[in-house]
Image (cartoon, rainbow, N blue to C red):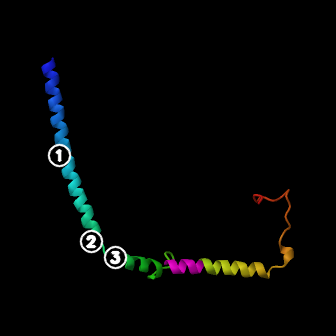
Amino acid sequence: MANKDKEDAQLQEQNLELRIAISDAYSAIEGYKAVQSFSALTFEELANAQILRIAGPDTQERPNELNRIKRVLDKVTQAVAKIKSMPPEAFQKSDPERDVNTPA
């Protein structure tokens, strides 16, 4: 019985050593692949990608960042102009019984 326990412990130790060796090899390969993928990118490529995202070509469905900001600015400007052109009577006075906004 003691001999069997000793043998099992040796087999378990050997199994653990083999798993560690295979894990180390796998980690080395994956690490090498990660380094290669990072070294394939250059600062210039990343900067150009950002420039294209900000000011590059766009469509109506997918505007670039500058056009997105311009759209928001135009909508806000139009809303402010419309609000300024409305008479004061167009706005309701605050009524605590009917207000749905959270009190300040």
Which of the labelled discs sits on residue 30, or is there none?
A: none
Instruction: Examine the image and state in which quarter residue 77 appears.
Output: bottom right
The residue identified by callout 1 is 21
* Residue 62, image x, y percentages: 49, 75
Helix, strand, or loop for circle 1? helix
User: From mark 3 to mark 2, how far is it between C-alphas?
Assistant: 10 Å
Disc 1 versus disc 3: distance between alpha carbons? 36 Å
Q: Residue 40 carries which label?
A: 2
User: Label 2 neighbourhood size at 10 Å, few (<14), some (14-19), many (20+)?
Assistant: few
Relative to 91, is 42 on the left or the right? left
Residue under the image location 23 percent in, 53 percent down: 27
Which region is colored magenta? 64-71
For marks 3 and 2, give the one nearer the viewer. 3
Q: State the residue in front, 29 or 73.
A: 29
Instruction: Looking at the image, tell me whether mark 1 or mark 3 is earlier in sequence order.
Output: 1
Q: In this view, does 38 lie above or below 71?
A: above
Residue in the picture at 36% in, 75% down:
46
Q: Which quarter of the figure is the C terminus placed in?
A: bottom right
The correct choice, above or below, for 45 with respect to 6 in the image is: below
Q: Which residue is drawn at 20% across and 49% down?
A: 24
Q: Which of marks 1 and 2 is in front?
A: 1
Membership of 67 in magenta stretch: yes
Task: Identify the residue under disc 3.
Answer: 43
Q: Where is residue 34 in the image (x, y as percent from the top left)?
A: 27, 62
| Residue closer to the observer: 30 or 77 | 30
Image spot of residue 20 (x, y percent): 20, 44
**Callout 2 amino acid:** Ala
